[in-house]
Amino acid sequence: MLTYQGIDALSGFRRHKLLAHLRHADPNIQSVTAEYIHLVDSKKGKLNAKADQQLRQLLTYGTAFNGKHAGRLF
């Protein structure tokens, strides 16, 4: 299984709304981020360089994820 990073999964509006909702459950929550990921199941296993580059180009769209991979992961 190959894993490729995706784009930011939350718009500014959705991030703000989700953070407000989460703070009702725990006021100590300071921020929230979400990112799409792409899982590729290849029968050949690892892709060659050309196929990997083509797949990465196909998966490059939308707003890039600029969040941090820190804190608790859900």
Image (tube, rainbow, N blue to C red):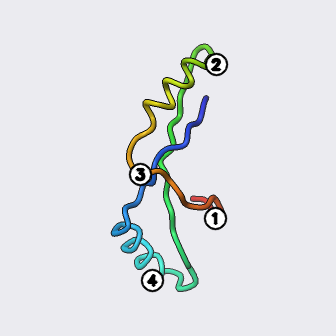
- For marks 4 and 2, give the one nearer the viewer: 2
Position of 19 relative to 14 (above/below): below
Residue at 45% over, 75% down: 19
Amino acid, disc 1: Arg
Say the numbered circle drawn on residue 63: 3
How far apart are the two marked residues, 3 and 2, measured between alpha carbons?
A: 29 Å
Q: Are marks 3 and 2 in contact (CB under 8 Å)?
A: no
Q: Looking at the image, is mark 3 or mark 2 earlier in the sequence?
A: 2
Query: Where is residue 28 shown, x and y percent of the image?
Result: 58, 84
Q: Are marks 1 and 3 in contact (CB under 8 Å)?
A: no
- Considering depth in this image, is 57 or 5 the residue closer to the camera? 57
How far apart are the two marked residues, 2 and 1, measured between alpha carbons?
A: 30 Å
Q: Looking at the image, is mark 4 or mark 2 earlier in the sequence?
A: 4
Residue at image mark 1: 72
The C terminus - image quarter? bottom right
Say the numbered circle drawn on residue 38: none
Residue at 40% over, 60% down: 10
Amino acid, disc 2: Gly
Q: Looking at the image, is mark 2 or mark 1 earlier in the sequence?
A: 2
